[in-house]
Image (spheres, rainbow, N blue to C red):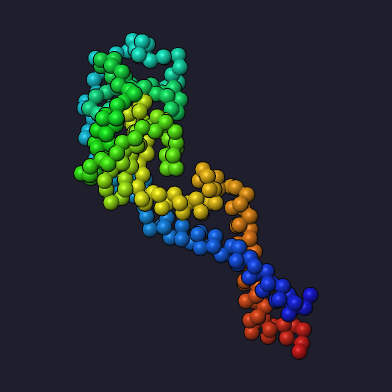
Amino acid sequence: MGQKTLQSFMRRWHRRLAIVIGLQFFAWTLGGAYFAWFHIDNVRGQYDVKPKPEATALSTESFLGITELKEKVDLAAIHSVELIHWRGRWAYWFKQDRHESRLVDANTGQLLSPISSATAEAIAKEDFAHNSPILRTVLLNQHNAEYKGPLPAFQISFDHPKQSKLYVHANSGRITARRNWIWRGFDFLWMLHIMDFEEREDFNNWLLKLMSILGLVTLASGYGLWFLTSQRFRRFRMKLLGP
């Protein structure tokens, strides 16, 4: 294959590949810039979390034993239990699986969950650093586009410039996700970045692998064309092969 034929072949396929890969190159570049500009704590809503007061001194003398709570919780189904400070009191957090868990007051044995919508709103207000009113509260029994955490969960929407939403798990009384417009932009660009248009988690998918190979071929063909058409290469070729 002569040099002109090789150049023509490379130029033709470089243009074709550039049409296919160009938009993805733009998405990768735009996503990379967005990821660099916005700190991950801002994406996760950590900048909007109110500082928590220190927990009260821990005295276990008045705590009920785990076995004393068998009427409140099915202990046979529990795989772990954790003592936590929850809204000014100490509570046992019984965990069964990702969705099923229960809170029980460690002193009185009172069952604290599932929580009400009013309690969920109070938890959200205690967590959110800004004095913004709540727009709406919705109980979710299935996942939506921005929440894949444990269910059921309360979605608390705030009237704030960041369009912030907090998700409170009804069975544990814990905030399981914080969302805002920065996160939503990140999530959209991350989807384009890894080319997983459903779960946004699989960065080993075949489409991403294919586009990465095509991207490398496009770059290689571009550099190859630059090399073949450069004056330095022509002078080198003439010295090597003669006029």
Q: Could you tell me residue 100's position as x and y percent? A: 42, 24
Foreground pick, 92 / 161 = 161
Q: Quadrant of residue 111?
A: top left
**Which residue is at 44% across, 39% downward?**
144
The N terminus - image quarter: bottom right
Outermost residue toward the right in this view = 1
What residue lies at 68% left-to-right and 84% top-to-bottom? 234
Of residues 169 and 222, the one drawn nearer to the viewer in this rendering: 169
Residue 171 in the image: x percent, y percent?
36, 26
Instruction: Say which of 94 and 147 sits in front.
Output: 147
Is 34 left or right of 68, judged from the image as shown? right
Indicate the quadrant containing the C terminus: top left, top right, bottom left or bottom right.
Answer: bottom right
Number of marks in the rendered image: 0
Q: Is residue 96 above or below residue 157?
A: above
Can you give x and y, in whole percent of width and height, for residue 240 in the image?
Answer: 75, 83
Q: Does the image show residue 93?
A: no
Furthest toward the bottom, the residue is: 243
Image height of 122 relative to 34, above or below = above
How far across and down, in percent of the image, does residue 30 sit? 46, 61
Is 121 situated above or below 9? above
Quadrant for residue 242, please give it.
bottom right
| 30 left or right, relative to 239 | left
- Vertical placement of 172 versus 69: above or below? below
Q: Residue at x 67, y 74 (%)?
A: 11
- Is any atom of residue 139 visible in this view? yes
